[in-house]
Image (cartoon, coloured by chain):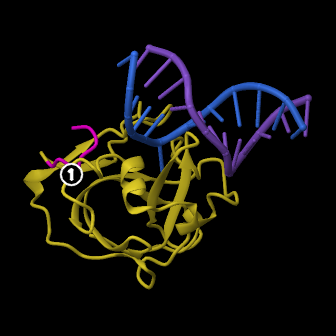
Chain colours: A yellow, B purple, C blue
Amino acid sequence: MLVYDGPRGPLAIRLVEVEAYRGLRDPASHAYRGKTARTAPMFGPPGRSYVYLVYGMYHCVNVVTERDGVAGAVLLRGAEPVAGLGDDPRALAGPGRLARALGLTTFQTDLDLLHSPLTIRDAPAVPDRLVVRARRIGLREGATRKRRWRFYVKSSPGVSRP
DNA sequence: CGAATGATCCGA
DNA sequence: CGGATCATTCGA
């Protein structure tokens, strides 16, 4: 679950699709070529946000996962609406749509996701048989390897591409 | 399939 | 500085 108390009121979504990114070992990662101003949050402590602009018009929201000093994050690629977001089950399917629906931009990068208007919370466990593991999407490099670091909930409408 | 659209990054 | 790149989406 991701909860956002922002300008649009209290919003809540159930995350159903994510991708993992690492650092210097992962050619697909923004952190691959070292730390920059933009990617600095990826190298910071876990539990914080990393939001960036892609293709000049969409934002992507990540959760930093590794300990301070080690790059790693999870890209939020799809979710189901839970509260405050209407009832289009596809409105959050895809990282760009997810960020747009919540109104998240680079202004929300590097936030503490445990003590902010933007928080990530526990949710009921998804049974293993409903968890699909696949190759990552949209990468020029890194998807061609054996890195199946995309995970999504089987047959959820919030998944970008099954 | 390709256009949209702008921040970022690297090389010169 | 300039140009290539880009963890995407939408519409023809």
Q: Nearer the viewer, residue C3 or A29?
A: C3
B10 on left or right of A109: right
Query: Quick check: can you spot residue A152?
Result: yes
In the displayed structure, A125 sits above or below A114; it is above
Residue A26's x, y, as percent? 51, 46
Query: Quick check: can you spot residue A75?
Result: no
Residue A6's x, y, as percent? 43, 75
* Mark 1, secondary structure of its residue: loop
Q: Quadrant of residue A8?
A: bottom left
**Which residue is identified by label 1?**
A88
User: What's the amino acid at mark 1?
Assistant: Asp
Picture quarter with the N terminus of chain A: bottom left
In the displayed structure, A91 sits above or below A1; it is above
Residue at image position (65%, 47%) is A33
A72 on left or right of A90: right
**Main SS category, magenta section:** loop
Picture quarter with the C terminus of chain A: top left
| Other residues around mark 1 within 10 Å, as few (<14) / some (14–19) / many (≥20) | few
Residue A58's x, y, as percent? 49, 47
Residue B9's x, y, as percent? 72, 46
For mark 1, name the chain.
Answer: A
Residue A161 magenta:
yes
Query: What's the magenta region?
Result: A156-162
Q: Nearer the viewer, residue A149 or B7?
A: B7
